[in-house]
Amino acid sequence: MARATGCNLETIRYYEKIGIMPDPPRSTKGYRSYDNAHVRRLKFVMRSRDLGFSLEEVRGLLGLVDEQSRTCAEVQIIAEDHLTDVRAKIADLQRIEHVLSDTVARCTGDAVPECAVIDALLDA
């Protein structure tokens, strides 16, 4: 399954351990036997993580999938909450970028002990 999805083997085992991925059936020799449903679920988890969903949010989404009684409204609530978090992070990063940009612009880069970046960090 690691080869089929590009997911690290240890990550797959971790997802199984925490219940995000179901334990697969085992062969008579004890090897895990994954099917298409496992691959599809793991790809769902990986894509969700790529979009920044936390493991708890992924668990919530999977719960809706597993119940097969989900409504688009339930999924929308989770996605909108996550989108709000993403937008807040973007705003924080934009503030950080602005402060760093201004501070770096004041830095002379000379071989002197005075440094605008260090001063800004000390005065924070």
Image (cartoon, rainbow, N blue to C red):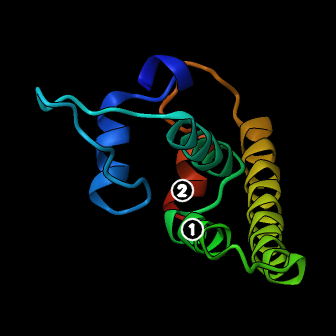
How many numbered callouts?
A: 2
What residue is rendered at 31% in x and 51% in y? 23
Q: Quadrant of residue 115?
A: top right
Indicate the quadrant containing the C terminus: top left, top right, bottom left or bottom right. bottom right
- In which quarter of the view is residue 52 placed? bottom right
Q: Secondary structure at mark 2?
A: helix
Count neighbours of disc 2 (C-alpha within 10 A) and say few if under 14, some if 14 to 19, many if 20 or more.
Answer: few
- In the rendered image, residue 49, in percent from the top left (x then y), is placed at 61, 49
Q: Secondary structure at mark 1?
A: loop
Q: Pick whichever, 20 or 89, lies toward us.
A: 20
Q: Position of residue 35 (x, y in %)?
A: 48, 34
Q: Image point 74% across, 80% down: which residue?
A: 69
Q: Residues within 10 Å of mark 1 (few under 14, many from 20)?
A: few
Indicate the amino acid at tag 2: Leu
Residue 82 falls left or right of residue 53:
right
Which quarter shows the N terminus? top left
Determine which of the numbered discs, if any, sits on residue 68 in the image: none
Residue beneath label 2, please? 121
Residue 124 disc label: 1
Amino acid of disc 1: Ala
Question: Could you tell me which residue is drawn at 56 percent across and 52 percent down?
Answer: 119
Residue toward you, 101 or 57: 57
Please state which of residues 73 and 28 is positioned toward the viewer in this rendering.
28
Seen at 80% across and 70% down, the residue is 79
Residue reaching furthest left? 29
* Cβ atoms at labels 1 and 2 below 8 Å apart: yes
Report the residue that reaches farthest toward the front.
Answer: 28
Residue 58 on image: x %, y %: 58, 64
Give the spatial CA distance, label 1 vs label 2: 5 Å
